Amino acid sequence: MIGEDKPREECGLFGAFNHPDSAKMCYFGLYALQHRGQESAGIAVADGGAIDEYKGMGLVPDVFDMDILEGLNGSSSVGHVRYSTTGSSVVANAQPLVVRHRNRAYAVAHNGNLVNAHHVKAELEDAGSIFQTTMDSEVFLHLFVRSLHLGFEEALKASVARLKGAFSMVVLTSRGELIGIKDPHGFRPLCLGKLNGSWVLASETCALDLVQAEFVRELDPGEIVIISRDGVKSIRTNTPNRRAFCIFEFIYFARPDSTFFGHNVYLTRKAHGRRLAEEAPVDADLVMPFPDSGTYAALGYSEASGIPFETGMIRNHYVGRTFIQPTQSMRDFGVRVKLNPIKELLKGKDIIIIEDSIIRGTTVKTRVKALRELGVKRVHLRVSGPAHRFPCHYGIDFSTKGELIAARMNVAELRDHLGLDSLYYLSLEGLLASTGIDNPVDHFCKACFDGCYPVQFDDNLSKHCMEVRRTP
Amino acid sequence: MIGEDKPREECGLFGAFNHPDSAKMCYFGLYALQHRGQESAGIAVADGGAIDEYKGMGLVPDVFDMDILEGLNGSSSVGHVRYSTTGSSVVANAQPLVVRHRNRAYAVAHNGNLVNAHHVKAELEDAGSIFQTTMDSEVFLHLFVRSLHLGFEEALKASVARLKGAFSMVVLTSRGELIGIKDPHGFRPLCLGKLNGSWVLASETCALDLVQAEFVRELDPGEIVIISRDGVKSIRTNTPNRRAFCIFEFIYFARPDSTFFGHNVYLTRKAHGRRLAEEAPVDADLVMPFPDSGTYAALGYSEASGIPFETGMIRNHYVGRTFIQPTQSMRDFGVRVKLNPIKELLKGKDIIIIEDSIIRGTTVKTRVKALRELGVKRVHLRVSGPAHRFPCHYGIDFSTKGELIAARMNVAELRDHLGLDSLYYLSLEGLLASTGIDNPVDHFCKACFDGCYPVQFDDNLSKHCMEVRRTP
Amino acid sequence: MIGEDKPREECGLFGAFNHPDSAKMCYFGLYALQHRGQESAGIAVADGGAIDEYKGMGLVPDVFDMDILEGLNGSSSVGHVRYSTTGSSVVANAQPLVVRHRNRAYAVAHNGNLVNAHHVKAELEDAGSIFQTTMDSEVFLHLFVRSLHLGFEEALKASVARLKGAFSMVVLTSRGELIGIKDPHGFRPLCLGKLNGSWVLASETCALDLVQAEFVRELDPGEIVIISRDGVKSIRTNTPNRRAFCIFEFIYFARPDSTFFGHNVYLTRKAHGRRLAEEAPVDADLVMPFPDSGTYAALGYSEASGIPFETGMIRNHYVGRTFIQPTQSMRDFGVRVKLNPIKELLKGKDIIIIEDSIIRGTTVKTRVKALRELGVKRVHLRVSGPAHRFPCHYGIDFSTKGELIAARMNVAELRDHLGLDSLYYLSLEGLLASTGIDNPVDHFCKACFDGCYPVQFDDNLSKHCMEVRRTP
Amino acid sequence: MIGEDKPREECGLFGAFNHPDSAKMCYFGLYALQHRGQESAGIAVADGGAIDEYKGMGLVPDVFDMDILEGLNGSSSVGHVRYSTTGSSVVANAQPLVVRHRNRAYAVAHNGNLVNAHHVKAELEDAGSIFQTTMDSEVFLHLFVRSLHLGFEEALKASVARLKGAFSMVVLTSRGELIGIKDPHGFRPLCLGKLNGSWVLASETCALDLVQAEFVRELDPGEIVIISRDGVKSIRTNTPNRRAFCIFEFIYFARPDSTFFGHNVYLTRKAHGRRLAEEAPVDADLVMPFPDSGTYAALGYSEASGIPFETGMIRNHYVGRTFIQPTQSMRDFGVRVKLNPIKELLKGKDIIIIEDSIIRGTTVKTRVKALRELGVKRVHLRVSGPAHRFPCHYGIDFSTKGELIAARMNVAELRDHLGLDSLYYLSLEGLLASTGIDNPVDHFCKACFDGCYPVQFDDNLSKHCMEVRRTP
């Protein structure tokens, strides 16, 4: 269950080629990627020259049942999970997006955000195209079918070349080909796996683990992989001289059992916690996370500091979307609905809380207040990443800059605002160093921390970034 | 989410008297008690001389929405959650059970099991009564209306006196009275709370915490509490000279933030873990629970032994009831659907697993196998309670004796069966001592461990118990 | 589709004994009886010593599907359709009512109304019985199980003897016996049919026709028929010296293809129409019914008078329950939603409308107004039965006396109120004579026309009837 | 409820301009047109520069409720009902079809069939267009947006000019304009009405009657009507020198209370019946329709012949789609499920049945057989139109030629096949003459009778038609 003050991932992708139970493979792949999107789920299969699809609102096991999966025949498939929002949560925006053109059909699943989608769409409409959706992936498809006179591969290359921003995509054709596409900066993850004679594409390695596929490699930035009866063909396009993998995958998004660049997420988060203990030690009776955030960093902090780890707030496992709000006649029992602190454990203690990020700060503030009311003596907050001060333009639903509390307050102000005894953010250097990756500065997008956006999205961008660098 | 190889609690109870938002109070109370039953939920309110009710299959937030709650007017209410089974899971068996008789109505919510229900029911049917359900609580209601010529209180006493077994009950009358009843051995919990001018009855203190009611006291064994406009009246009935509170509430059932006899469950479970470390030390790289079982005992074990605590298997938070089974064409990826072990953490290590109980052993066996395949070196299992060798007749859905694996194998056989390097159960003495309660042997029912059943349920009972004592 | 100003029948009954597809037989039987009740439908089957049932709100084909029917195994069955109301339309009141008692179960389907249900119920509650429903049939079942010490047949007789009012019932036991019961006056229809080795009980012969069963005979007033492996056993109870079959079955309720006392309903209604033409001739261009009422009487009127028959108002066949009301901003287009008059046919004409009854008169008034607006010159209304001036106490949901417009106005007043040029009701003598039955006055209940109630329902009854007789 | 052996109409259209309750107007309009399509219903409204829509499977009152209608704000609207089939019955094919292009949106509702849709679509796909549906109306929209550079009106004219076949369309723009379009032959009906300051477009006048709009005129063949704040503008395009209005609208499709060319459908059908009595008199006891087909022609036949009209088969009004099939163990009670003949009326009689058409003949054959089994002496069938021997290419779902029984048998063969004593089809001359329209041969498409197709749909067309003429 996603925390209420956490950024939301855009999506999770999965594709399977040449598997007798392709739709079920997809189901399990999406199931392992459910943390990347809880709003909707969809699977499309190529069957006998056509594409069948099924999409619905809700979690993967709620959307699909055995009858549905057994109705999705065909040995190639592509699936998608989408993030959870409240407003425009409609099945029309669920993916994969399937279109039919001439005697072919195409299904696209997309993770990321195109910064030039609006301009390209306007251009295509002027030329007489009619769009069915507001999804970025449809822009890609219109470019593609208008380039088909160049041939299939050239059409792929030509249409990808028109896109700017962050995008990992999996495309299925009605002939059963499965195509993986990653943008030139490699913002979003996408990896290739193998399972007997089948091939698999997935956002994270945890999906490969579940279906027991063998990890082959991550797609390179700018790479197009075409999987067909002829094998796996890789097309490389021009790329910039540095990657920009979203560092927040390591801090928060990815499942702890996934691995990127050969580094496991669980162990990396523990390393962040150890580094945090070194950068900001403090004397206390116990260290604990707020569930379900910061657990692994808290274990690392405990390990490095020798302060006991406890799970001092008990989560109600049954919290759902349809929860009723307490009414006026009841005192505000706020945080307790989801979390109940163990009074006997915490009363009169000095405690360290480990969080992985603070967006608006409202949840932290409420929880700290609840701990104070219980009789906790001192509350120290340690955050296992730098402060979020810049919005993301590449597909993460961070609050706008105005809502990012760290963009409006310095650390001392924020400490007081949150009612803490002390507050410390892991340094950007500490974060990068503790990933354990060589030359980490050339691997990551960290724009949300420092405002340096790898892909220009408007004219004021570079100025903006320089200004930030001057005043870190 | 309840583990698949865990015993199931019968139910959770909540009642509210004289509260302007009584139904919503009940909703929140049930919400906090959701772990005691996920099959169905129901709320009944006394409104203007009648009782309105709403019941449904599923979790509390799925059954109720704002419209439903706002339709349940009245200042007194009673609610119930029921455990999750697969078979006869029908709304007809949801509680509270409401009946109308003459110009009155009564709603009953029940936790426990009557051992003489069958005999009393046959007697009543011979006298011309027609039963609507197969619920024990209906037996109580028929006894009650047939005793009403004695007057209200005497009818309560006379009908309770006919019941044998384990029962905590909350009864609501259409006049708005709220009645709490606990059997003479006090098998199941029930406590009284206070909130401004309102009174609350609840299975566990965590429900009082959520609605911010003040804990007053637990009901005594054999006590009947009648809450009305005239205040709280207590009626004591004859009781045996010892209690028989279900010790499994401390080990597994209750929420860690609840308290019984003044002892917090979280801290008690940690004490079990510390005692376990003393009774059965072993050298290892890390200690970890299988989620979500044994976490607190594992923290205690780590604390007493100095061996690092880790959460080495990652739970998929989105596992639901409608999950699809993998098919033949996929290799059995068994345990991974729900849990993925962190290979980078566990490979080549000696590890200690802490469990709170083993019923059929199937889940443990599968998980240990998965750890072995990953390359874990040695696996030591420590269980934070004695071996389950006897079925429960007081309302816990343990497997029958034949399915209790510890009833069929000794510890060495079970260790080999589960594929472990070592296996140790906490001793009954160690369990009782580490509860921290004075003279614990007079407080608990531990029949599932030693076969000594406090209430006779058939003729072979006492023999059975003695035999057990001879061969511990 | 039932007219909006028509009385509502209570129910339709069907039972089948010893048929391999008993539940499906019941389905088709209820289907043929759907006009007797559209609110709910239910079927119960005796299977292996237990009774399974399925009930739901709505029409027979909406409540049941193939899966449900195939799940209802057993060679004996009983089914029920219930009339359509708006208010307390809940599945809890659907029939058959099934209860379990000792090792047996019983299912009852009931058509009619007990005038002493309230008194008997109070007596039973004082003796400790708990009622599940507010249905009359439950009173019968409580009486029955409390008499079982007398033996099965005597218990049936003893409990039927306690009932007063109108009742036809079909009872199914878990041993597979099928029992038909008709009250001593024979208010409601119930007949016996035969189909190879199977026996069938049904409210109307049209249900026998559909399942191709052979009509054997109608049950006699006061008869109990027990169908078992031992054959068909008939028990006669004391009966009054005259029948009181509801004459409105001939006029309106029954399907035109049904037959009572050897007289077909369609032909009888035509005979009413012919008699009406004799009693109240008038010169006109055409004669027509309001759909769907009075069609057959209109054919008879046309035949006797030589005036052409037309269907001058076209019904919209798709009118459903969920129909939206026009709003203020639209002119009231009232009657046209359901019926559109053929302007080209009716404009400037003198027309005769045939109706079978007028209850509140609102619909007639609106329709006549619509005809006037269209330009119809003269409108003569002829009703194929006497005026309804008295409520029914035997199970027909006539409006209360206050709402019966003929109880408040004489014929001249009503003619003016409805905006007619002339109005005539068939005389009671004419109605009885045109049924073609010998000595008809001893066969029918006609209390709604003359206030002579065959079964006393309160102390003022006889007075009331006499008064009526004085002023016909 | 549509007969099972009847051709199916394609659709019904309704549009409202400048009405405060535009969506509700549309609802009632569609409601009156429900007989033209029971598969799906949809309404789109122009609101504040956007178009909102709601579509669903099923009947109008099932698809829409008050909440939905009140959510559809805007003073201009367009609605559509679609015919009922079994196979591809999916909401994706429901209309109106709404697309967004640049800053505008367009909704189209379509009745008819384009014979060149396939070719135009292929051409557009080659130019890079992506189609969302397989509906003809989408072809029109793609043509339209690709012509928009010509300006709005010219784009309309240019795109309509590309279409070949039968089409009546209503288009709504997001600016609130309402456009009516009729193909150059005027195959399908579409008329204009007026209601205070509002304008209405509808397939039939019965829809105008219901919303109490005043009939203004039918659209002319080849006319485009643009209704906007500037009033009603008519654009005439080139048309052939003869109309081709579907004559089957008079015989079967249209509601009897509708009027085309000033001729009422009910009276026209009676005229067909009178002509039939003249062309094919026969001595008999009674004349009757099979419900619900041929009723009005039967009244005409009775009037001209003096033979009494009866409704000798009683329809079960509650037959629904979910009806269960009888099983093997029951004798085939075939026709009786829907219709029960009145034995007492029909036995031993000579009867005339009036039908309006015979497609496959299966239903007629079964019904005649049922009458024979009942004991009817002679059965004469008279059909109120010529024999159907040719499929329709303009939007009517006639069976293919192979399934049209009259294409395979001559009248004598068919008489024997159906088990009749005599069979007669109204002559084409008689049909045309009895419409009462001057020079009828220039007004109608009667291709299903004579194979003369007004619009060429393939190269063998004219040959085909001539051949037919040689062998009538």
Image (spheres, coloured by chain):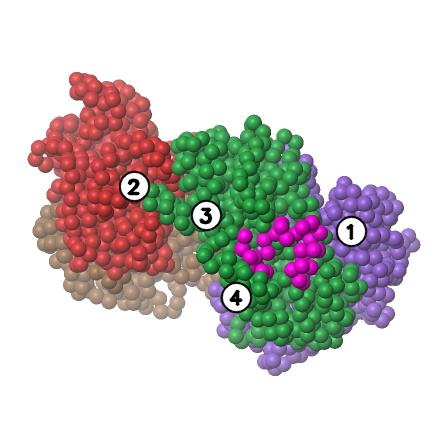
Chain colours: A brown, B red, C green, D purple
Which residue is at a point 81% across and 54% down the rendered structure image? Answer: D286
Q: Amino acid at mark 2?
A: Arg
Q: For the residue labelled by badge 4, is the local secondary structure a helix, a strand or a loop?
A: helix
Q: Are marks 3 and 1 on the same chain?
A: no
Which residue is at a point 62% across and 54% down the rendered structure image? Answer: C247
What segment is highlighted magenta in the picture?
Answer: C426-454
Q: Are marks 1 and 4 on the same chain?
A: no
Residue beneath disc 1: D358
Q: How many marks?
A: 4
Residue beneath disc 2: B146
Q: CA distance from mark 1 to mark 2?
A: 71 Å
Residue C358 in view here: no
Q: CA distance from mark 3 to mark 1?
A: 51 Å
Mark with earlier residue (4, 3): 3
Question: Residue A333 occupies which quadrant of the picture?
Answer: bottom left
Q: Amino acid at mark 4?
A: Glu
Which labelled disc corresponds to residue D224?
none
Q: Nearer the viewer, residue B206 or B461?
A: B461
Tell whether position B272 is magenta: no
Disc 1 versus disc 4: nearer the observer: 4
Whether residue D101 sits left or right of residue B194 in the image: it is: right
Q: Amino acid at mark 3?
A: Asp
Which residue is at a point 78% across and 51% down the rendered structure image? Answer: D358
Residue beneath disc 4: C403
Disc 3 versus disc 1: nearer the observer: 3
Q: Are marks 4 and 3 on the same chain?
A: yes
